Amino acid sequence: MGKTKTYYTKDILKLELAEQLGYRKKIRQYGWGELTSIESGKLGGQMRSYMKKYHWVFTLHQFINYLI
């Protein structure tokens, strides 16, 4: 019996944004490791923007207040 991959919300977001940026074919053929640093940076920036816009990311100050 083969292993199954568990996809988390961030994984799905990453895949969707990679498709929007036009990296889907490259990723499917060669894997994530073949993205250039510029492509990876664009993807990471898009993820960060999306997560910040929809409040997926806590700032340090918000996190400390959340713990208190």
Image (cartoon, rainbow, N blue to C red):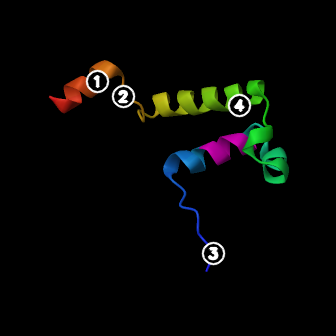
Image marks 2 and 1: residues in contact by CB distance under 8 Å: yes
Which residue is under mark 2?
Answer: 58
Q: Label 1 belongs to which residue?
A: 62
SS under mark 3: loop
Badge 2: residue crowd in 10 Å (few <14, some 14–19, many ≥20): few
Which residues fall within the magenta stretch? 14-19
Amino acid type of the residue that numbered disc 2 sits on in the rendered structure: Phe
Name the kind of residue labelled 1 in the image.
Gln
> Residue 46 lies in what quarter of the image?
top right
Give the mark nearer the N terminus: 2 vs 4.
Answer: 4
Q: Quadrant of residue 7?
A: bottom right
The residue pinned by badge 3 equals 2
Magenta span dominant secondary structure: helix
Say whether residue 17 is left or right of residue 5: right
Q: CA distance from mark 3 to mark 2?
A: 37 Å
Q: Amino acid at mark 4?
A: Ser
Q: Earlier in the sequence, mark 1 or mark 3?
A: 3
